[in-house]
Image (cartoon, helix red, strand yellow):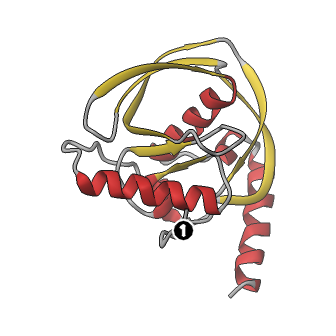
Amino acid sequence: MPTSLLTILEFPDSRLRKKALRIDNVSGSTAHLADEMLRAMYAAPGIGLAATQVNVQQRLIVCDVSEEKNAPLIFINPKILEMDGETETQEGCLSVPGFYETVIRPEKILLEAVNREGEPFQMEAEGLLSVCIQHEIDHLDGKLFVDYLSSAKRQLIRKKLLKQQKLSR
């Protein structure tokens, strides 16, 4: 898959805090955006990406937690209906490069969404896929995984990333 023209925003960019808007009309441009997001996610490399991370304020996420990176999932207007259990996992984020921290989330979820053809569906997810979907939906709501950390840890990550960003300019 060729590289994407999309740029992934990095914390503490304020655009990552914007809430995404519902997609009322799934169109060819929605499918094209999903394809471009998948390219950006695979190139990064990552297992999930939300439209807000590429500065598009639409409720669209993509994920692929397969080892072979051949099972892409697209969720338009995803909404979690049920949550169950609890799991503690090491999370990282393409918008917070190089940092991995422990986050506690529900282990299983039931969600509803719309596919790239505009058809609604429901899906159960658990394990890594569940965590990935929850992480990406957080992005759509302007929330980052660092928000689950202590203020001191969040500030340390912020300072380190700002320093890295200055050095790379």
Given residues 1 and 159, the one toward you in this image is 1
Q: Quadrant of the N terminus?
A: bottom right
Q: Quadrant of residue 88?
A: top right
Residue 29 as seen in the image, left or right of residue 7:
left
- Residue furthest bottom in the image: 169
Q: Quadrant of residue 130?
A: top right
Q: Is residue 5 visible?
A: yes
Q: Position of residue 113 (x, y in %)?
A: 36, 29
Q: Which residue is mark 1?
A: 2
Q: Position of residue 28 (x, y in %)?
A: 24, 54
Residue 26 as seen in the image, left or right of residue 112:
left
Q: Is residue 169 above or below residue 114?
A: below
Q: Quadrant of the C terminus?
A: bottom right
> What amino acid is labelled 1 in the image?
Pro
Residue 56 as seen in the image, left or right of residue 152:
left
Other-residue count near label 1 (Cα within 10 Å), few / some / many at <14 / 14–19 / ≥20: few
Q: Quadrant of residue 150?
A: top right
Task: Tell me what residue is drawn at x 28 percent, y 42 percent.
Answer: 22
Task: Tell me what residue is drawn at x 70 percent, y 77 percent.
Answer: 165
Given residues 152 and 61, the one toward you in this image is 61
Q: Is residue 11 visible?
A: no
- Residue furthest top in the image: 84
Task: Tell me what residue is drawn at x 51 percent, y 46 percent.
Answer: 139
Q: Position of residue 161 (x, y in %)?
A: 74, 68
Task: Tell me what residue is drawn at x 59 percent, y 39 percent.
Answer: 135
